[in-house]
Image (spheres, rainbow, N blue to C red):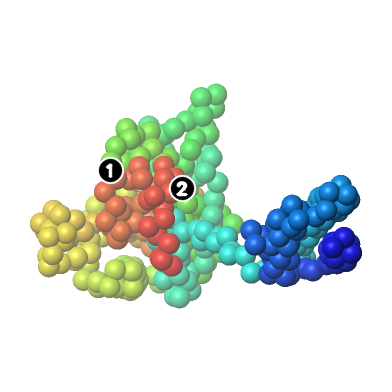
Amino acid sequence: MIDTLKQHLAEVEAFSSTSKDEIEAFRIKYLGKKGLLNSFFAEFKNVPNGQKKEFGQAINQLKTSANEKVNTLKQAVENQSETQGKYGDLTRPGEPIEIGARHPISIVKNRIINIFSRIGFNVSEGPEIEDDWHNFTALNLPEYHPARDMQDTFFIQTDPDILLRTHTSSVQVRYMENNRPPIRTISPGRVYRNEAISARSHCFFHQVEGLYVDKDVSFADLKQTLQYFTSEMFGKSKIRLRPSYFPFTEPSAEVDVYWGLETETDYKMTKGTGWLEIMGCGMVDPNVLQNCGIDPEVYSGFAFGMGIDRIALLLHQIPDIRLLSENDIRFLDQFKSSL
Ligand code: DAH
């Protein structure tokens, strides 16, 4: 009997495995309910008194050894699966990486850039902190010109010459100062106005300015370009130009696109008229060309300016302009599938 126990002890000590199943089978064989150890313990009462001490010690030793063996082998298997290979356990479920969404302002801006780049317009930019010359004076808005009141300006307190640009028309001036015709450029960017914040207006928003200067540029070229734009952008090519006033263009016009009145939303968007105002435009005032060092006797041009936020609100049916700058993930997430 003692010999059998000693044999098992040797077997336990020699046992080794990296397979969970094998280790479990080993545990059941020795330590399970109907395992060898329990049967040895049951045998104990039949052992002659003289041998009980030796027998008892041998069983206990076997039990301790078997327990230790199972624990160390199990631990080794677990550690191994964690450190397996350079990347750990490749069979573990992955942690998905959240895909970001483009901001609706970027979506609309990129579409506008794309449409104009197809007809030869490049993209230009200018500073958001601007001087009086580029934002006003060069654009035919001299000091005390009443039209300056059209735009509530944020001035830098210590220097009335420095301000936050109120429109991207300032980039027109910078571009003409630094480039000779033919000029075909669009200038997207952020602009600022000291306005009360509401669902409809914000103290900062985004515009795209367009400028085309060359010999013999006419109002017909402007109209054709705008028609191309609205049909590419909105799928609508019926437009109308209403006479308007901007100091930097002469003549000036407001552009409406015919949206239609097919759905209830169309009614809401167009206030029941079917027409949607989308931008201002006109022929660049000769004074502006002159201010930028371009001879108005030789060159003429057209310009236009539109609000990106407004178009984004319209296209995506966003009810409140403030959503565009609040960085609420629940809102931004909805643009995941957009371009
Ligand atoms: N700068 C004007 C605004 O902020 C928009 C604009 C109108 C730009 C007519 C132009 C233009 O270039 O020709 O309201």
**Disc sitting over residue 200 in the figure:** 1
Is the CB of mark 2 within 8 Å of ligand 1? no
**158 in relation to 79, above or below:** above
Q: Position of residue 265 (x, y in %)?
A: 16, 59
Residue at x 16% of width, y 61% of height: 266
> Mark 2 is on which residue type?
Arg
Q: Give the residue furthest to the bottom.
A: 118
Q: Exactly how many numbered labels are in the figure? A: 2
Q: Position of residue 24 (x, y in %)?
A: 69, 65
Query: Which of 240 and 4 lies nearest the eye of the viewer?
Result: 4
Disc 1 element: loop
Q: Which quarter of the image is occupied by the C terminus? A: bottom left
Mark 2 and mark 1: Cα distance apart in space: 17 Å
**Disc sitting over residue 180 in the figure:** none
Query: Which of 240 and 146 lies nearest the eye of the viewer?
Result: 240
**Quadrant of residue 145 within the rendered picture:** top left
Q: Position of residue 87 (x, y in %)?
A: 73, 65
**78 in relation to 291, above or below:** below
Residue at x 84% of width, y 63% of height: 1
Residue identifier under label 2: 190
Residue at x 48% of width, y 38% of height: 164
